[in-house]
Amino acid sequence: MKFLLDVHIGTSFARALVERGHDVVRAALDYPKWGDERLLEFAVAEQRIVVTQDSDFTDLVYAFGKPAPPSMLYIRCEPEQLPSMVGRVLETLDSGRFDDHMSVIRPDDTRYRPLPRENKNA
């Protein structure tokens, strides 16, 4: 799988995904001057799963109707809990339920919301 890690998502997440054989792009290192809208366009074009800790990407997709990437993993926790959330993210990936969804991952649960898609038959 291919991932785009938002600027708040650090080394521990990148390392865990790379160790599993995934292709990881880190916005903070690879595209530090890009805004969220440009990063989202990149994720859609490259078919990358977005991993974020803020609501900017969800706002762009759900509120402003921007095209959605294959999936989004939205991590909701206190900043000091973020390093311990790597295992929760990997569990979500292993579940197989995240595809074509926004997964809201919290320390004790995960919720799934389908991503909006254009009607290709219209």
Image (tube, helix red, strand yellow):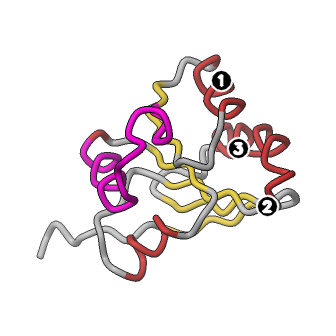
The image quarter in which residue 10 lies: top right
- SS at mark 2 in the image: loop
User: Sequence order check: which comes first, mark 2 or mark 3?
Assistant: 2
Residue drawn 49% across and 29% down? 24
Q: Is residue 55 above or below residue 74?
A: below
Disc 2 marks which amino acid?
Answer: Cys
**In the image, farthest residue toward the front:** 33
Residue 19 left/right relative to 117:
right
| Circle 3: residue type | Val
Whole-angstrom CA distance, mark 1 to mark 3, is: 13 Å
Q: Residue at x 62, y 65 (%)?
A: 112
- Amino acid carrying mark 1 in the image: Arg
Left or right side of 68 for 29:
right
**Magenta stretch: dominant secondary structure:** helix
Q: Label 1, on which residue? A: 15
Residue 81, given in percent of the width and then of the height, sits at 85, 51
Which of the two labelled residues, at mark 1 and mark 2, occupies the earlier sequence position? 1
Residue 110 vs 92, above or below: the answer is below
Q: Nearer the viewer, residue 36 or 17?
A: 36
Residue ID for mark 2: 77
* Residue 5, position as x, y percentages in the image: 52, 42
Q: Which residue range is magenta in the image?
A: 25-45
